[in-house]
Image (cartoon, grey):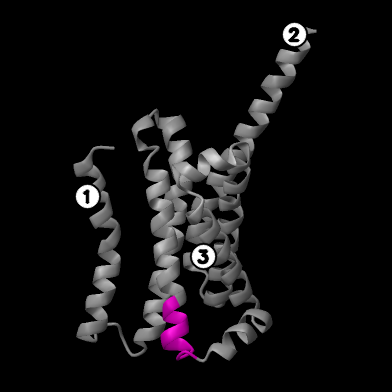
Amino acid sequence: MTRAVKYFIFLLALLPFAVLCWGAVANTLGPDPADTLATETGEWAFRFLLLSLAITPLRAIAGWPKVFPYRRTFGLFALFYASVHFLVYIVFLLQLRWSEIFEDVLERPYITVGFTAFLLLIVLGLTSTKKMMRRLGRRWMQLHKLVYLINILALIHLVWILRTDLTEAVFYASILLPLLAYRVYRRYVRNASKHINLSTSN
Protein backbone atom coordinates (compact mmCIF):
# COMPACT_ATOMS: atom_id res chain seq x y z
CA MET A 1 0.00 0.00 0.00
CA THR A 2 1.59 3.28 -1.13
CA ARG A 3 1.57 6.21 1.26
CA ALA A 4 -0.72 8.25 -1.02
CA VAL A 5 -3.29 5.44 -1.24
CA LYS A 6 -3.04 4.88 2.51
CA TYR A 7 -3.81 8.54 3.22
CA PHE A 8 -6.65 8.53 0.71
CA ILE A 9 -8.26 5.46 2.30
CA PHE A 10 -7.77 7.00 5.75
CA LEU A 11 -9.48 10.26 4.77
CA LEU A 12 -12.26 8.44 2.91
CA ALA A 13 -12.95 6.26 5.94
CA LEU A 14 -13.17 9.34 8.17
CA LEU A 15 -15.58 11.11 5.82
CA PRO A 16 -18.77 9.61 7.38
CA PHE A 17 -17.56 10.72 10.81
CA ALA A 18 -16.89 14.23 9.51
CA VAL A 19 -20.36 14.38 7.90
CA LEU A 20 -22.00 13.29 11.16
CA CYS A 21 -20.02 15.87 13.17
CA TRP A 22 -21.03 18.58 10.73
CA GLY A 23 -24.65 17.44 10.91
CA ALA A 24 -24.55 17.62 14.70
CA VAL A 25 -23.11 21.16 14.60
CA ALA A 26 -25.50 22.32 11.87
CA ASN A 27 -28.46 20.57 13.52
CA THR A 28 -29.37 18.62 10.39
CA LEU A 29 -29.58 15.13 11.91
CA GLY A 30 -33.34 15.13 12.24
CA PRO A 31 -35.69 15.34 15.22
CA ASP A 32 -33.58 12.93 17.33
CA PRO A 33 -29.88 13.68 16.63
CA ALA A 34 -28.64 11.30 19.33
CA ASP A 35 -30.54 8.37 17.83
CA THR A 36 -29.27 9.28 14.35
CA LEU A 37 -25.68 9.40 15.60
CA ALA A 38 -26.05 6.07 17.37
CA THR A 39 -27.61 4.39 14.34
CA GLU A 40 -25.18 5.79 11.78
CA THR A 41 -22.00 5.11 13.77
CA GLY A 42 -23.19 1.58 14.55
CA GLU A 43 -23.92 0.85 10.91
CA TRP A 44 -20.58 2.27 9.78
CA ALA A 45 -18.83 0.03 12.28
CA PHE A 46 -20.64 -2.96 10.75
CA ARG A 47 -19.85 -1.82 7.21
CA PHE A 48 -16.14 -1.65 7.97
CA LEU A 49 -16.33 -5.07 9.60
CA LEU A 50 -17.82 -6.44 6.39
CA LEU A 51 -15.17 -4.68 4.30
CA SER A 52 -12.46 -6.22 6.46
CA LEU A 53 -14.03 -9.65 6.07
CA ALA A 54 -14.30 -9.21 2.29
CA ILE A 55 -10.56 -8.71 1.77
CA THR A 56 -9.57 -12.39 1.94
CA PRO A 57 -12.03 -13.68 -0.70
CA LEU A 58 -11.37 -10.61 -2.84
CA ARG A 59 -7.65 -11.32 -2.77
CA ALA A 60 -8.14 -15.02 -3.53
CA ILE A 61 -10.92 -14.86 -6.13
CA ALA A 62 -10.00 -11.64 -7.93
CA GLY A 63 -6.27 -12.19 -7.56
CA TRP A 64 -5.60 -8.83 -5.91
CA PRO A 65 -2.83 -9.45 -3.36
CA LYS A 66 -2.29 -5.72 -2.86
CA VAL A 67 -5.64 -5.35 -1.08
CA PHE A 68 -4.50 -7.50 1.87
CA PRO A 69 -3.12 -4.59 4.00
CA TYR A 70 -6.57 -2.98 3.92
CA ARG A 71 -7.96 -5.78 6.09
CA ARG A 72 -6.31 -4.40 9.22
CA THR A 73 -7.13 -0.81 8.21
CA PHE A 74 -10.84 -1.54 7.80
CA GLY A 75 -10.85 -3.56 11.01
CA LEU A 76 -9.41 -0.66 12.98
CA PHE A 77 -11.94 1.74 11.49
CA ALA A 78 -14.68 -0.69 12.53
CA LEU A 79 -13.31 -0.39 16.06
CA PHE A 80 -13.19 3.40 15.75
CA TYR A 81 -16.84 3.70 14.68
CA ALA A 82 -17.91 1.12 17.26
CA SER A 83 -16.15 3.20 19.94
CA VAL A 84 -17.94 6.35 18.79
CA HIS A 85 -21.20 4.37 18.74
CA PHE A 86 -20.60 3.35 22.35
CA LEU A 87 -19.69 6.90 23.38
CA VAL A 88 -22.86 8.27 21.79
CA TYR A 89 -24.85 5.69 23.74
CA ILE A 90 -23.10 6.60 27.01
CA VAL A 91 -23.05 10.39 26.63
CA PHE A 92 -26.24 11.24 24.73
CA LEU A 93 -28.65 8.37 25.29
CA LEU A 94 -27.77 7.50 28.89
CA GLN A 95 -26.47 11.01 29.69
CA LEU A 96 -23.56 9.54 31.69
CA ARG A 97 -25.81 7.63 34.07
CA TRP A 98 -23.17 4.98 34.67
CA SER A 99 -25.31 2.82 36.91
CA GLU A 100 -27.72 2.20 34.05
CA ILE A 101 -24.99 0.82 31.77
CA PHE A 102 -24.75 -2.45 33.68
CA GLU A 103 -28.53 -2.69 33.95
CA ASP A 104 -28.88 -2.29 30.18
CA VAL A 105 -26.13 -4.83 29.46
CA LEU A 106 -27.72 -7.38 31.79
CA GLU A 107 -31.40 -6.75 31.06
CA ARG A 108 -31.55 -5.76 27.38
CA PRO A 109 -30.43 -8.61 25.09
CA TYR A 110 -29.66 -6.40 22.09
CA ILE A 111 -27.31 -4.27 24.22
CA THR A 112 -25.75 -7.43 25.70
CA VAL A 113 -25.01 -8.70 22.20
CA GLY A 114 -23.70 -5.34 20.96
CA PHE A 115 -21.54 -4.79 24.02
CA THR A 116 -20.06 -8.29 23.70
CA ALA A 117 -19.19 -7.61 20.06
CA PHE A 118 -17.60 -4.30 21.08
CA LEU A 119 -15.44 -5.91 23.78
CA LEU A 120 -14.26 -8.62 21.38
CA LEU A 121 -13.48 -5.98 18.77
CA ILE A 122 -11.34 -4.12 21.32
CA VAL A 123 -9.38 -7.32 21.94
CA LEU A 124 -8.74 -7.74 18.21
CA GLY A 125 -7.74 -4.10 17.88
CA LEU A 126 -5.25 -4.33 20.75
CA THR A 127 -3.68 -7.47 19.27
CA SER A 128 -3.57 -6.30 15.65
CA THR A 129 0.03 -5.02 15.77
CA LYS A 130 3.00 -6.90 14.32
CA LYS A 131 4.50 -7.09 17.79
CA MET A 132 1.43 -8.91 19.11
CA MET A 133 1.41 -11.19 16.08
CA ARG A 134 4.96 -12.28 16.88
CA ARG A 135 4.22 -12.63 20.59
CA LEU A 136 1.07 -14.71 20.15
CA GLY A 137 2.37 -16.82 17.26
CA ARG A 138 -0.15 -19.42 16.13
CA ARG A 139 -2.60 -18.29 18.80
CA TRP A 140 -2.95 -14.97 16.96
CA MET A 141 -4.75 -16.62 14.03
CA GLN A 142 -7.08 -18.49 16.37
CA LEU A 143 -7.83 -15.32 18.33
CA HIS A 144 -8.59 -13.25 15.25
CA LYS A 145 -11.09 -15.78 14.00
CA LEU A 146 -13.34 -14.10 16.56
CA VAL A 147 -14.03 -11.57 13.81
CA TYR A 148 -16.57 -14.05 12.41
CA LEU A 149 -18.42 -14.14 15.72
CA ILE A 150 -18.22 -10.35 16.00
CA ASN A 151 -19.89 -9.95 12.60
CA ILE A 152 -22.67 -12.36 13.56
CA LEU A 153 -23.23 -10.55 16.86
CA ALA A 154 -23.27 -7.20 15.06
CA LEU A 155 -25.95 -8.48 12.68
CA ILE A 156 -28.05 -9.81 15.58
CA HIS A 157 -27.64 -6.47 17.36
CA LEU A 158 -28.87 -4.67 14.23
CA VAL A 159 -31.86 -6.99 13.77
CA TRP A 160 -32.94 -6.41 17.37
CA ILE A 161 -32.67 -2.64 16.98
CA LEU A 162 -34.57 -2.44 13.68
CA ARG A 163 -37.26 -4.98 14.74
CA THR A 164 -40.11 -3.97 12.43
CA ASP A 165 -38.23 -2.85 9.29
CA LEU A 166 -35.61 -5.50 8.59
CA THR A 167 -34.72 -4.34 5.07
CA GLU A 168 -31.26 -3.11 6.07
CA ALA A 169 -30.60 -6.19 8.18
CA VAL A 170 -31.49 -8.46 5.25
CA PHE A 171 -29.16 -6.43 3.02
CA TYR A 172 -26.24 -6.80 5.44
CA ALA A 173 -27.02 -10.48 5.96
CA SER A 174 -26.91 -11.03 2.19
CA ILE A 175 -23.33 -9.74 2.29
CA LEU A 176 -22.21 -11.43 5.50
CA LEU A 177 -23.53 -14.93 4.82
CA PRO A 178 -21.62 -15.43 1.53
CA LEU A 179 -18.44 -14.13 3.19
CA LEU A 180 -18.84 -16.67 5.99
CA ALA A 181 -19.84 -19.41 3.53
CA TYR A 182 -16.63 -18.77 1.61
CA ARG A 183 -14.61 -19.49 4.77
CA VAL A 184 -16.51 -22.72 5.37
CA TYR A 185 -15.99 -23.79 1.76
CA ARG A 186 -12.27 -22.95 1.87
CA ARG A 187 -11.84 -24.92 5.09
CA TYR A 188 -13.67 -27.89 3.55
CA VAL A 189 -11.44 -27.78 0.44
CA ARG A 190 -8.30 -27.63 2.57
CA ASN A 191 -9.37 -30.56 4.73
CA ALA A 192 -10.35 -32.58 1.67
CA SER A 193 -6.99 -31.81 0.04
CA LYS A 194 -5.11 -32.89 3.16
CA HIS A 195 -7.12 -36.13 3.28
CA ILE A 196 -6.34 -36.86 -0.37
CA ASN A 197 -2.64 -36.17 0.15
CA LEU A 198 -2.52 -38.45 3.19
CA SER A 199 -4.32 -41.20 1.29
CA THR A 200 -1.91 -40.84 -1.64
CA SER A 201 1.16 -40.94 0.59
CA ASN A 202 -0.09 -44.11 2.28
Instruction: Identify whether 183 is placed above or below 164.
Output: above
**Residue lying at 38% horizontally and 58% vertically, measured from the top left:** 77
User: Mark 2, residues whose alpha carbon is within 10 Å: few (<14), some, or many (≥20)?
Assistant: few
Horizontal relation, residue 98 to residue 95: left or right: right
Residue 91 in the magenta stretch? The answer is: yes
The residue lying toward the viewer, choosing from 137 and 92, is: 137
- Residue 93: percent from the left, percent from the top? 46, 87
User: According to the image, label 2 marks what residue?
Assistant: 200
- Magenta segment, prevailing SS (helix, strand or loop): helix
- Residue 192: percent from the left, percent from the top? 70, 24
Q: CA distance from mark 1 to mark 3?
A: 29 Å
- Is any part of residue 62 visible from this angle? yes
Q: CA distance from mark 1 to mark 2?
A: 50 Å
Mark closest to the chain's N terminus, 1 or 3 = 1
Q: Quadrant of the N terminus?
A: top left
Nearer to us of marks 1 and 2 is 1
User: Mark 1, residues whose alpha carbon is within 10 Å: few (<14), some, or many (≥20)?
Assistant: few
Q: CA distance from mark 2 to mark 3?
A: 46 Å
**Residue lying at 22% horizontally and 77% vertically, measured from the top left:** 22
User: According to the image, label 1 marks what residue?
Assistant: 8
Magenta region = 87-96
What's the mark number on residue 169? 3
Give SS at disc 2: helix
Q: Amino acid at mark 1?
A: Phe
